[in-house]
Image: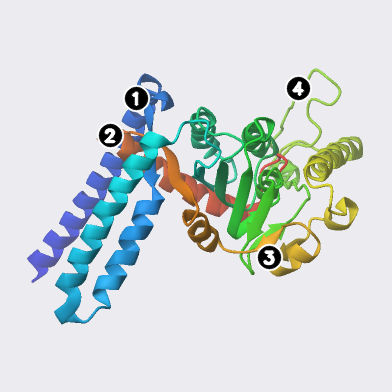
Amino acid sequence: MEFLFEYGLFFAKVATLLVAFVVVVSVVVGASQKNKYGEGRGHLEITPLNQQFEDLKDTMLIATTDESLQKAEEKKLTKAKKKLLSEQKKTAKNVSESDTTKRSKVYVLNFDGNISASAVGHLREEITAVLTQATPNDEVLLKLESAGGMVHSYGLASSQLDRLRKKNVPLTVCVDKVAASGGYMMACVADKILAAPFAIIGSIGVVAQMPNFNKVLKKHDVEFELLTAGEHKRTLTMFGENTEKGREKFIEELEETHQLFKEYVSTRRPQIDINKIATGEIWYGSRAKDIKLIDDIQTSDEYLVSRIEDADVFEVAYVFKKKLHQRLGIAAEESADRLLVKWWSRLTQSSNKHL
């Protein structure tokens, strides 16, 4: 028994070392190959949602039909589909491109935001693709979920949505869970904002936090030097001794960023009282409607089903195809990032300003 115990312990150690080695190698190889393959090797995936919905409806119909009638119902549905397909082909031949009765198209995009708004890489490609086909008669539906993050990152994400506005392509944003701070900066670009009753909306404010270890360094007789050229190159620092002048300048920069944020929102949603809602507070969907942060209470699923009835709906996703070693490397990097972010968020946030 003792031999088996020692052997099991030895095996566990070897397995742990092997897993650690694979993770390290994957990270190194993934990083080295990143420039070689790049993000430009992605591709579009376009999914027609009307057919998915019809298939779902048919499946439910057959499953809830009496067992003795199921085969007859399946034949009936197959015959009806063939007839519909034939009618659609005939209609397509007779309807010209300029026909105003042509069904509009709805392009569905997804944005799941993090602190750095890294999904903007996908979003920019998706919007570029959609703009090659979309007209003012069509619509873009963005399913948005984000609690905000870095100012410049969400500024870029919002600018991507502004491209639709400039081309007069209607944009609807659906918020099922959260669109706060930088997330709301993106949402406010839309012609129409819909939210679930308990979705978190708002938080039009700016925050920056950072620790200062200067006293700890002094206690252990560690000197820290920070050399700058330019009066305000560095206002606050994590390791140096912060001054009141530097602190005042940093607060001034926060206020300026907040003012820009307020102007951005009020320009795109002039119906809101910006001074009333730009306090950094959040509101749940029902309350957000009362103060005009959103236009209606509705989930993305409910809205999609309603649009499928009168439009051709397509989900558009730009996917970066990765090889096995890249996927392993990215998975390891993401796991490390999650652990680091979790630890760091408990301690503090970086000195970068966050919306």
N-terminal of the pair, mark 4 or mark 2, is 4
* Horizontal relation, residue 277 to residue 149: left or right: right
Mark number, residue 285: 3
Disc 3 crowd, CA 10 A, few/some/many (<14, 14-19, 20+): many
Observer-side mark, 3 or 4, equals 3
Task: Give the residue displayed 47% in from the left and 55% down from the top.
Answer: 308
- Judging depth in this view, the residue of 161 and 191 nearest the camera is 191
The residue tagged 1 is 33
Whether residue 340 is visible here, answered yes or no, is yes
Name the residue beneath numbered marker 2.
325
Q: Which of marks 2 and 3 is nearer the N terminus?
A: 3
Q: Image height check: is 303 above or below 23? A: below
Nearest the viewer among 330 and 250 is: 330
Residues at circles 1 and 2 in contact by the CB criterion of under 8 Å: yes
In the image shown, does 326 or 244 lie closer to the viewer? 326
Residue at x 71% of width, y 58% of height? 295
Q: Which one is closest to the eye, mark 1 or mark 3?
A: 3
Marks 3 and 4, how far apart at CA: 48 Å
Q: How crowded is mark 2: few (under 14 residues within 10 Å), some or many (20 or more)?
A: some
Q: Distance between the residues labelled 2 and 3?
A: 43 Å
